[in-house]
Amino acid sequence: MDSPLQAWRDTLEELGVMGLVREPVVAALKPALPASAPRPASGPALGPTRRPAEAPPRPAPRPAPAAATAYTPPTDPVGCPPPEAVAAAATLPELEKAIQGCLACPLGPGRLKFVFGEGSPQARLMLVGEGPGRDEDLQGRPFVGKAGELLDKMIGAIGMKREETYIANVVKCRPPDNRTPSPDEARTCLGYLHRQIELIQPVVIVTLGATPLRELVGLSEGITKVRGQWKRVRVGGREIPVMPTFHPAYVLRQYTQDVRRAVWEDLKAAKAWIDRPAED
Ligand code: URA
């Protein structure tokens, strides 16, 4: 029962994509940039809906604390890395070294570990989440808790490995009680994410949930409305296609076949764009 094949079947079942019929590569991914890649007409056949025992209860939304505006950051270059130092970092390790002591926003002093991001420096697929949670704060790595386990399965379901991708967050330090980072906190950290994107030069960015869509792409529309629709972001003079999808934590809370299939289709569209034949 524990064979790799069984594990693969379990993963596909959990993502609600068992029993699917092989679909043609998304035809709309042909144009220069996927302005509005439509979804495939026929979705995969319905699979079993198995709710994982570990699905956490829906947390109550929490407002950003007023303390975010009262914080006085340090002025030294370690606590507050200047933009020139960020721009001068020529590799991801150099960038991490330059910013890992950051205390530029109120999240810095509260962290256990700085969560820089991880993955292949040559990743074609970059996934951007919101910010570290408890497990990530403890380990200093992005998406290692329950949401991360699901993210790994989602990546596996499109035939990729986590190590082939690059995973980062809008903010690098854990917001207290896992609240949404405030716009000020996100803005303070955004230059780091931009530099990561410039260094990695991904072919596609998948944003996970509303926060990276709002802070990185500048779109405040509801994620339910825009998921699955190609967007784009300009970073370092390059325009990069962005595929917005649900955050894995949302998928765990709304563990329906529709939600799981939506994420799977979004990731499939991203993969199809990465794999498209080179243009003449
Ligand atoms: N949620 C996120 O947005 N990022 C993580 O790294 C973990 C959970």
Image: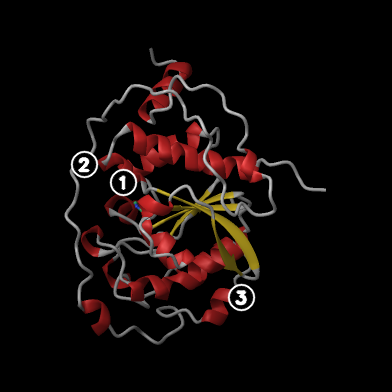
- Is there CB contact under 8 Å for labels 1 and 3? no
- Is there CB contact under 8 Å for labels 1 and 2? yes
Query: Quick one: label 1 or label 3, which is nearer the N terminus?
Result: 3
Q: At numbered mark 3, what does the secondary structure look like: helix, strand or loop?
A: helix
Query: Quick one: label 3 or label 2, which is nearer the N terminus?
Result: 2
The response on whether ligand 1 sits within 8 Å of label 1 is yes
Separation (CA) of disc 1 from disc 3: 35 Å
- Is there CB contact under 8 Å for labels 3 and 2? no
Q: Quadrant of residue 176?
A: bottom left
Q: At numbered mark 1, what does the secondary structure look like: helix, strand or loop?
A: helix
The numbered dot on residue 56 is 2
Q: Which residue is mark 3?
A: 88
The quadrant of the rendering that contains the N terminus is top left
| Amino acid bearing label 3 | Ala
Picture residue at 29% right of the left edge, 75% below the top: 106
In this orientation, does residue 141 appear? no
Q: Position of residue 5 (x, y in %)?
A: 47, 17
